[in-house]
Image (spheres, grey):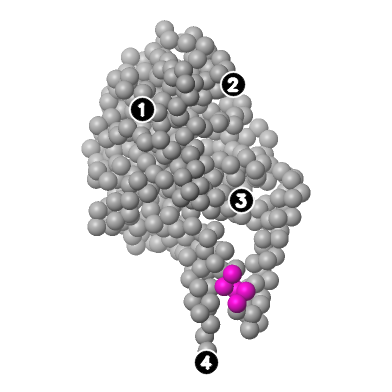
Amino acid sequence: MHISPAAPIFWICLAIPAYVYFGYPALLASGFLARRKPVYRQRIQPMVSIIVAAHNEESVIEGKIKNLLALTYPQDRFEILIGNDGSTDRTAEIAARYTTQRVQVITSEVRRGKSSIQNEAVMAASGEILVFTDADCLVSPDTLQHAVDNFADPNVGLVTGTAAFSNSSETGVSRNENLYSRYEAWIRRQESDRGLLAAASGSFFAIRRQLWQPLEANVGDDFVLPLQVALRGKRNLLASDVLAWTSLPVHADSMFKVKKRIVSKDFRGLLRNQAVLNPLRTGAVAFGLWSHKLLRWLVAYFLCGLLLANLWLLHSTFFRITLAAQILFYLVAVIALARRNPNIKLPWSVILSFCVVNGAAMAGVFDCLTNRSFAQWKPIRSPLPAYKR
């Protein structure tokens, strides 16, 4: 019996996305990849430097500074550094009002990019623990102490919080992004518990000063730094009691832009730290990165291959059904996108979000490979969310 060469392509392109979304989580939950590794925690209070990179953040920067000043960590044991990256609004002026309260403003008159202003802020920092947190999120008063306590374990190199979401107006897009974020947070918890985590939440994470390395342009600090921690044999930890409240994109186009920029920067960072993908170097951490990050970013390419292979396999009823199912799936997403209705209901909103996220990943990988630059970021800000105790 003649077997079309398109058949193996079809099954490979179907199997990889299925593995990424279902197989890998099942392996994590089963404990097959690694056993849970406990963390030693103790109340410690080293000097901490909190760094906030800011460009045109006048709508949120005062609320952010007040939120950080309200931390219950000893007042003489932390400092706040605002990295003002060429802002043309009142960001620097507002931040300067707090320079008598352990706040230092590091200003670049010319906009140089997030990585550059973060590097400059670290040079001015005095803490043995560096904390990076976004300007548009809030934390509870005990967040910093909860994060720092984990550094009592000498094997812990980086501690990341979990992004929690609080939108004043929820849409189908933000609702599904919240659902996806819960799925992502579950995977990260599983990886963290087993010492496999190699990513952080940009909303809030802390790293030992001795593990810091200056950031290159066009990379994401919340991805490259965890990679470097893993390469140096230390553990990235997700702390469940460290939460940072932020808002989600409420429209498909804004979600697409955010996801595309993140994937482009993170993919570039992974390419510049390829050694972390070698299991002989980083063990099961490499397996997790292949499964959780690299293959997931390439899912859209495999789905394109699946559709194209299916077009060559119309000789049987089974393949005609699978082709019809794929066309219907994407048609639903196109119609939902064309309607531009942010309140689209389940299950149609799930299909739209799936296509937007994977389309953004596909575009982000392409932008990276074609050397498109995202060094200068343009924040899209909503009012600061309220954190929940």
Which mark is nearer the camera, 1 or 3?
A: 1
Is tag 1's residue or tag 4's residue first in the polypeptide sequence? 4
**As drawn, which residue projects farthest toward the front?**
370
Residue pointed to by mark 1: 119
In depth, the one of 74 and 56 nearer the eye is 56
Which circle, 4 or 3, is nearer the viewer? 4
Give the main secondary structure of the magenta stretch. helix
18 is higher (above) or lower (below) than 225 = below
In the image, the segment drawn in magenta is 308-312
The answer to whether residue 121 is seen in the rendering is yes
Residue for point 48% across, 71% down: 12
Q: Tell which of 137 and 117 is nearer to you.
A: 117
The residue tagged 4 is 1
Q: Residue at x 46, y 45 (%)?
A: 371
**The stretch drawn in magenta includes residue 311:** yes
- Other residues around mark 2 within 10 Å, as few (<14) / some (14–19) / many (≥20): some
The residue where tag 2 is placed is 59
Q: CA distance from mark 2 to mark 4?
A: 67 Å
**At label 3, which amino acid type do we have?**
Val
Tag shown at residue 356: 3
The one nearer the camera, 310 or 80, is 310
